[in-house]
Amino acid sequence: MDWIKLYEEDKMGMEKGKNTENLGRKEREEFLSKYPIESIPNLTIEQYVFGDDNSFSHWLRYRLCNFASMGNTYPESFGVYTKKETGSQICLSRSYKEFSSDYEKAFNCLKKRIVNFLEDVKQENYYNIEKYNR
């Protein structure tokens, strides 16, 4: 066994991990400066859904990849979204179909859930996190 080679590989892996951690912290800080918790209740649908590189959903899906990768997530995962095929038409995920076509009401409910989730995490109340999976 080549112990020196294993050591070098481990060292490179740790350095890569530290770089990823630092990038993740920067991404998180930038996201929180753009979207602090107290601003979420005032988000508009346009600021939330995909459409531009600075939307809330775009940040979660693509720009926080070093902080927490979402993998191959579909727009429907964000509750209120648009599809490429329908252009700017607002759609609701299955979990918000109870609101029929009242997108504003669904979006207000979604924003409350996001704030509640973030408050639970902030208070390290991890037992409540399961209730947000729908």
Image (cartoon, helix red, strand yellow):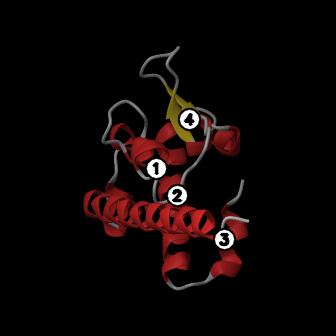
Find out whether the residues at labels 4 and 3 contact each other: C-beta distance under 8 Å: no
Amino acid identity at mark 2: Ala
Q: Which residue is mark 3?
A: 129
In what element is the residue under mark 4?
Answer: helix
What residue appears at the point 47 percent right and 22 percent down from the top-left corner? 89
Q: How many marks?
A: 4
Quarter occupied by residue 38 = bottom left
**Lower sequence index among marks 4 and 3:** 4
Q: Along the horizontal axis of the image, is 50 left or right of 44?
A: right
Between marks 4 and 1 in the image, the one whose residue lies nearer the viewer: 1
Mark whose residue sits in front, 2 or 4? 2
Is there a contact, CB below 8 Å, between mark 4 and mark 1? no
Give percent across and percent down for residue 13: 53, 63
**Circles 2 and 4: CB atoms closer than 8 Å:** no
Picture coordinates of residue 49, whole percent (x, y): 43, 38
Three-letter amino acid code of the residue under disc 1:
Leu
Q: Earlier in the sequence, mark 2 or mark 4?
A: 2
Residue assigned mark 2: 68
Q: Amino acid at mark 3?
A: Ile
Q: CA distance from mark 2 to mark 1?
A: 9 Å
The relative height of residue 20 versus residue 77 in the rendered view (above or below) is below
* Of callouts 2 and 3, the N-terminal one: 2
How many angstroms separate mark 4 from mark 3 (CA)?
21 Å
What residue would you read off at disc 4?
Answer: 75
Q: Which residue is mark 1?
A: 60
> In this picture, is 44 found above or below 120?
above
Of circles 1 and 3, which is in front?
1
Q: Could you say where residue 59 lies in the image, as x and y percent from the top left? A: 40, 47
Q: Secondary structure at mark 3?
A: helix
